[in-house]
Image (tube, rainbow, N blue to C red):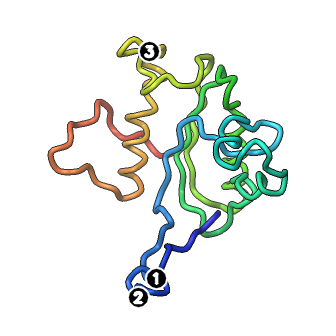
Amino acid sequence: MLHHKFPFAEQDPLASTVSNRPDATILCYPVISSGEYAHEGSFNNLLGADSTEAERREFSLEDHVDEQTPTAFLWHTTGDVGVPVENSMLYASALRKFETKFEMHVYPGLPHGIGLGDGKNGRQGSPHVGSWHPLAMGWLAAQGWQQAPGAPPTDADPPAVL
């Protein structure tokens, strides 16, 4: 996983003691790979249209998973033609190789950018696809995260662990 130093860390002793590594990640139809399944627009915006293959590989996350990579919750739709579902699959495969915990849900059909996926607010979706949100909340609870005081309750119990 790519780790970046804080700017001016050498000038601030406290900055060098703070990690920029997340404890967990929730990735919704993520752009992971710069390879065959790349979302070209994302890599062009990030690195420029004239970036080299080597520069793009540096940001191809499936190639940078290691034993320090945080646990992940991923969800994707098979109808996403902009960011193919293989991005999530490649990342999950890399996490599995390093025995990093992850949970992944792949929903049939539907395009990229469906919001919460629940079909509300004029977006495509269904209660089934919208299940990713309560599943993610349950996943966070299973990781030891607690709901913030005053936050609205989720509409589903955490999923059973098999």
Residue position marked by numbered label 2 in the rendering: 13
Residue 15 relative to residue 72: left or right: left
- Amino acid type assigned to the residue bearing label 2 in the image: Pro
For the residues marked 3 and 2, what is the alpha-carbon distance in whole angstroms?
47 Å
Left or right of 19? Residue 150 is left
Residue placed at 46% from the left, 62% from the top?
Answer: 23
Q: Quadrant of residue 127?
A: top left
Amino acid on which the number 1 mark rests in the picture: Ser
Say which residue label 3 marks: 123
Residue 31 lies, with reference to residue 16, above or below; the image says above
Label 3 or label 2, whichever comes before in sequence order: 2
Instruction: Name the one closer to the observer, 59 or 145.
Output: 59
In what element is the residue under mark 3? loop
Foreground tag (3 vs 2):
2
Query: Is 140 placed left or right of 83 in the picture?
Result: left
- The reply to whether callout 1 and callout 2 are in contact (CB within 8 Å) is yes
Q: Is the Cβ of the residue at disc 3 closer than 8 Å to that at disc 1? A: no
* Residue at x 57% of width, y 50% of height: 102
Q: Secondary structure at mark 2?
A: loop
Residue at point 37% right, 42% down?
Answer: 137
Q: Residue at x 39, y 11 (%)?
A: 122
Q: Which residue is mark 1?
A: 16
Crowd rating for badge 3 (residues with CA inside 10 Å; few <14, some 14–19, many 20+):
few
Residue 126 image position (x, y, % from top left): 45, 15
How far, Cα to Cα, is label 3 from label 1? Answer: 43 Å
Q: Position of residue 149 (x, y in %)?
A: 17, 50
Type of residue at label 3? Arg
* Vertical arrangement, residue 15 with respect to residue 1, above or below: below
